[in-house]
Amino acid sequence: MEKIQMVDLKGQYLKIKSAIDEAINDCIESAAFINGPQVKTFAGDLAAYLDVPHVIPCANGTDALQIAMMALDLNRGDEVIVPSFTYVATAEVIGLLGLTPVMVDVDPVSFNITADIIKAAISPKTKAIVPVHLFGQCADMEAIMKVAKEHNLYVIEDTAQALGADYHFADGQVMKAGTIGDIGCTSFFPSKNLGCYGDGGALYTRNKVLAEKISMIANHGQVKKYVHKYIGVNSRLDSIQAAILTIKLKHLDEYATAREKAATYYDEQLKGLEGITTPFRVANSTHVFHQYTLQVATDKRDELKKYLESQGIPAMIYYPVPLNEQEAFLEIGRVHGDLTVTERLCKSVLSLPIHTEMTQVQQDFIVGKIKDFLKN
Ligand SMILES: *Cc1c(COP(=O)(O)O)cnc(C)c1O
């Protein structure tokens, strides 16, 4: 049996090696390392995949979130509602720009923020909401968009973990994660569902004016060479990364299917075990399983993690500490309501290895070890 890893990037590469090697070589031969034609091609392909008119690549997912906040009319002291149960980047950029992250609890089923939680946290200073489609499953965007409309709030979707997930509206309409709010942000960090071989990110929007502003901000606020309209940043996707992503994008749906298949197998094998809850799936979103996250009895979680590691099985805690308890946010953030679910999740979640190269033999081994642990 192959060594078990949280993600198997090497194995995934080997299956598309010749195409990737050729694309990288072409890039080097052409020496168009920055803003090469590969970047435009990838942006066009991703726009077509997502069915969204504007895709603006950038250097990483954190930059995408920051550029999104900079492109919207937000001012110092304005409040932005974020889940407390997420990766730090979501809220970090809010603080960096002098805005106030308002950290709220999440739904125990989807692990995402909901319209009701958002509604309760809205104040006269609230200007934006950042739903995070955590672990690969969409937040309830239809209800969230309704609240946003009622209160005139911007919606920035953090879809770093859910690229490719489908959101289903009540009337049957289907839209890709990240294309429903004002701006969608994603990351191509190697371990993400569409990962490049370094850092990368992108923003998407349906709004042409916003798209132009985003492009300018990502490029020094530049209208044309040496004419700068906004204070911007220097945030680009390298040509080599774009070339790699163009190839991998063609496999994204097949990658999602492989993750989903592995998740379903875990579900079947682990269902009903005392002390373990398998991930819930909501009805109005597909799940692209960036993570396969169990909830484990809080008194057993850390021991199980240690035991699995001792057996050669990596397992990770995403995330061990609620954002509002992080020192960086103590002074600048505001907490709304009680964060009971977030606190419980931080003590109970455990993500198992899941990736596109997972074998049933590996999964049987993992499941067997979990069962062994629970018996003792
Ligand atoms: C990975 C991630 C980011 C940041 O992406 P980077 O490319 O690493 O900057 C932001 N939000 C979430 C939820 C993420 O998982």
Image: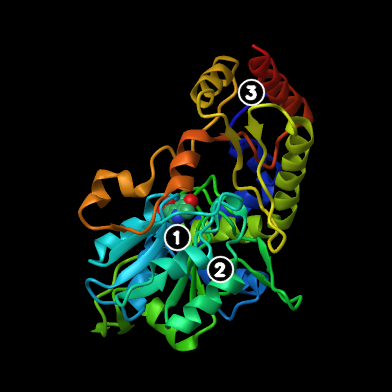
- Quadrant in the picture for residue 259: top right
Amino acid type at image mark 3: Lys
- Residue 315 % position (x, y): 55, 29
Residue 79 appears in view? yes
Q: Which residue is mark 2?
A: 178
Q: Residue 294 at x, y = what percent?
A: 61, 36
- Residue situated furthest top in the rendering: 376
Q: Amino acid at mark 2?
A: Gly
Residue 210 occupies quadrant: bottom left
Residue 41 visible in the shown view: no
Please give the residue where the numbered disc 1 appears in the rendered image: 238
324 to 77, vertically: above or below: above
Tell me what residue is drawn at x 60 percent, y 53 percent: 110
Upstream in sequence: badge 2 or badge 1: 2
* Residue 275 rendering spot, x and y as whole percentages: 63, 28
Q: Nearer the viewer, mark 2 or mark 3?
A: 2
Residue drawn where x is 24% and y is 44% of the image: 327
- The label nearer to you, 2 versus 1, is 2
Q: Residues within 10 Å of mark 1 (few under 14, many from 20)?
A: many
